[in-house]
Image (cartoon, rainbow, N blue to C red):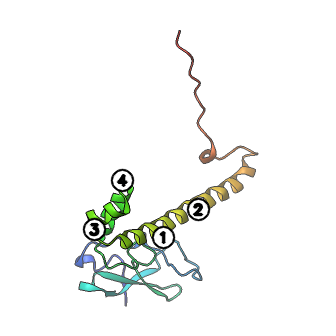
Amino acid sequence: MPKTATDGDRRGHHPPSAMFACPNPDCDLFNQFDAGNLSVCERMGKDQAIRRLYCNHCQQRFSERQGSLMQYTKLPAETVVRIIKCLGHGCSIEATADICEVDARTVERILEHAGRRAALGCSTRLRIRQRVHDTLGGLLEGAAPRCFRTAPVRKRTPSP
C-alpha cells in the first residue's frame, strides 16, 4: 500500500501533499490541491530525494518536480532559488550566472520557464475573477464584486 505524500519525509524536507495536484488534464481531480488523491509510490534521483507521486483517481504517476522550475534541472534547489532572487533584484543574465556559478544558458532557461509559469498563474487568476464576476454580477444586480471595486481616488486640495 503506498504511503501518503506526508509519510516518510524523514529523508529530507518535503512539502506536504496539499501543495500538489494531479497534472493529468484527463483526471477529474486535475489541478485540485489537497484533494486526498495523491500518495508517495516511490523515490528517485540521487539519494532518493525526489518523490514520485501516484494519483489514485486516474492511476497516473508523476514526479513531485513536474510542472515546477525544478522539472528539467539537476541543480540544487538552493541554486535555483538564488538564480530567481538575483533576477528578481534586477541582475543581468550574465551577472546572475556569475554569482550563481552556472552557465548563462541555464539562467536563460530558468528565466523562460519562470516567465511561462508566472503568465499561466496570472491568466488563471484572471479567469477565476471573471467567473466570480459573471456569477455574482447578476445576483448583485449589476454591482461589481468587491474584488473588482476600486478604491475611491482622493483628490488633493491645494493648501492655502
Which numbered disc flags the more N-terminal residue, 2 or 4? 4
Report how far apart the C-alphas of labels 1 and 3 lie in the structure: 25 Å
Q: Amino acid at mark 2?
A: Ser
Element at badge 4? loop
Contact between marks 1 and 2 (CB within 8 A): the answer is: no
Numbered disc 1: secondary structure: loop
Q: Marks 2 and 3: CB-CB under 8 Å?
A: no
> Along the line of sight, which residue is nearer the eye, 98 or 58?
98
Q: Amino acid at mark 3?
A: Glu
Quadrant where the N terminus is found in the figure? bottom left
Q: Earlier in the sequence, mark 3 or mark 4?
A: 3
How many numbered badges does the structure rendering display? Answer: 4
Contact check, label 2 and label 4, Cβ < 8 Å: no
Of residue 48 and residue 107, the one placed in the foreground of this image is 107
Q: Which residue is mark 2?
A: 123
Q: Classify residue 34 as left or right of residue 107.
A: right
Residue 121 on image: x %, y %: 53, 63
Mark 1 and mark 2: Cα distance apart in space: 18 Å
Residue 71 lies, in percent from the top left, at 40, 78
Mark found first going from the N terminus, 1 or 2: 1
**Marks 3, 4: nearer the viewer:** 4
Distance from disc 2 to disc 3, alpha carbons, whole Å, reads: 28 Å
Q: Quick one: which residue is furthest to the top in this view?
A: 160
Instruction: Determine whether 113 is above or below 86 in the image.
Output: below
Name the residue that disc number 1 marks: 33
Name the residue carrying label 4.
89
Q: Nearer the viewer, mark 1 or mark 3?
A: 3
**Residue displayed at 35% across by 70% down:** 104
Q: Report which quarter residue 144 is drawn in.
A: top right
Which of the two discs, 1 and 3, labels the residue nearer the N terminus? 1
User: Disc 1 and disc 4: Cα gap in Å?
Assistant: 30 Å
- Which residue position holds label 3? 78
